[in-house]
Amino acid sequence: MKMGISRLRLALCACALMLPLAACAGDVNLEKPVEIQPGKGVAVFSITLHGAIQTSSSVKWREIKDDKRMPVNWNGSISLARGSLFGTEELSRSPRQVWGRLAALMLPPGIYEFYDFNSEQLEGQAGGGQRLTLFHARRPFSRKFNVEAGKIQYVGNLDIHEGPIFSTTGGLMAGVFLGMFGAQVEVFPSLLDMGDADIPLIIAKGNGLNAADIAHNVAADEDDRHTQALFDDLRNKVKQGDIHAQRRLLLGLQKGLVMTESGEEFKVHKDRELQREIAGKLSAKQVSGGDYALAILKEPLLLNGQMDTLPTDEDGQKLLDDVLDDARRYYSPAMYLASNMYGRGLPGVQEDRKQSSLWWERYRSMTERSSNFVPYLDEAGKAEYRKFDRASNPRYFALTTSGAYGLSTGEDASVQAAIAACEARNGGSAEHCSLYARNGLMEWEACPAGYEGSMANTFPPVTGIGDIDDIAHLPLSVGDNGKTVYREFLKAMMPRAFAVADSGETAMASGDCHAAYKALQACSERTGKNCKLYALDDQIVLGATDPKLAEQEQRLTSLVERVSQGKAKLASHTVPVAESEKN
């Protein structure tokens, strides 16, 4: 019986993979002479995919007639697949160097649309079994194209970026019983005019066509115009020197998706020169993300973990130094990469398991999702975060340093809804809300753009003074209340700082790269005296002699003192209200 079920699963898997590769209604073979059938026209186009791309994918199309959507038949789809046996991917081997293909449809004249996306991933498992996951677009979309009788028309490049993937309860149940798991994927489509690149590739397929035979007929779409407007606005802010905009666009160019301050996401196409330009500006300003970007632009193999394939003449130490510059600024991608670089070694850099473990633990601490580690939240906020953590995907949680929060869960959950809920609690604070967690992944940045500068601290060097978890190592002047605060400090996420006064009073702060300043400031306000840093992140620093650490603490202490003096001066100039005026 078990053998029969296993064979049934494999048969279903095979069918699921083969169906998208069947000939579709209206398909035209572009490798043969194209002859237009009477009363019909030909739409030629390209399909390109980016993001979490699976083994095989298909895009559905249908006719729009009398404002009704009319599928041509059950198989109105265009397929792409990796591999040489059934593969339809071809543009990766062309000058375009993207995953995708050229396609054509012979259709009656009318208005049509691309409206849905599906993909499959077949993976081997331990023990020789196989797992098939079927991905479906979370939301339908519409990118229209026109077909005119007697014409061959280039209708555009349907470009699809796959965003976040969501597992579903029904999909998991199907996996348990049939071996085929279902999931949803967020799809970001656009229909672009890439005729200058696509038409020469279409002609080169040997179908007897020339440029004069193919008319441009790319329909402008309101959603695509909106995306372009968002990109143009962000690009203008980048040119004006806006650090927030530079940081957002740089991250977007790396990921393929940009998020606006309100939580709206839109896709952007890779542009290495623009990336390099922005990264250089951020590096010069010592804003986290710039140096890391310069390193991965110079050597993309770093992101694939292929350190052992780097050219032997590569300056591995320079690459490592760039990554470490940003890792020390709490930039989590750089921290993760630093751990890998130390773990694998580089040309000119020996493996260092101790450093690899150190950066991994720091990265893990900053990406911990437990409610105990979420900064700024009160008990009510922590309860809401636990509610978010138990919810099924999709789910989003937004946060701000003022302590405001918001979540969005359920079928229609969105980043925008979570941020809007957070801003509703924010009471007009200058600190705006941003995304903290998306599904099971942390999105929070300890040092977002604008948090650099005189108040910012960095990861301390390894001091070796003692075990940070050893409470007995605290100064003798620290009493029971101070020890309680220190235990809370040890539970907090990095960046974190713990300050002490000579008289034993303590204060802690965590959650952003101003933690050291905030801890010193809170301690000073509580005692009216100067305080010292006892612990910073994962190191005891009281008594450390490292010159960089000493300079950092002196700078922050001086800043706290200047701010305190300014407040005292302002208070002394307050004019008392006369008794007659009170009445």
Image: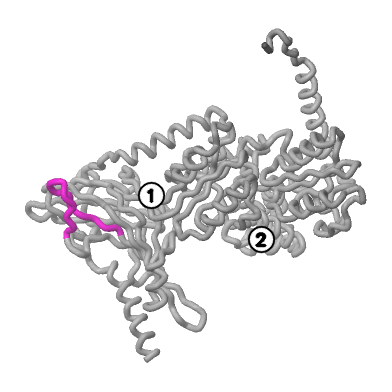
Residue located beneath label 2 in the image = 340
Where is residue 166 shown, x and y percent of the image? Answer: 43, 60
Residue 515's image quarter?
A: top right
> Eyeballing the image, is 452 above or below 13?
above
Q: Residue furthest right?
A: 476
Determine the residue positioned at 68% across, 64% down: 344
Q: Which residues are magenta?
A: 59-72
Callout 2, which amino acid?
Asn
At mark 1, the secondary structure is strand
CA gap, disc 2 and disc 1: 31 Å
Determine the residue positioned at 58% across, 49% down: 380
Residue located beneath label 1 in the image = 188
Query: Crowdedness of circle 1 by 10 Å Cα count: few (<14), some, many (20+)?
Result: some
Determine the residue positioned at 78% across, 43% down: 507
Callout 1, which amino acid?
Phe
Relative side of 319 to 273, left or right: right
Relative side of 34 to 279, left or right: left
N-term mark: 2 or 1? 1
Query: In the rendered view of the protein, which quadrant contains the C terminus?
Result: top right
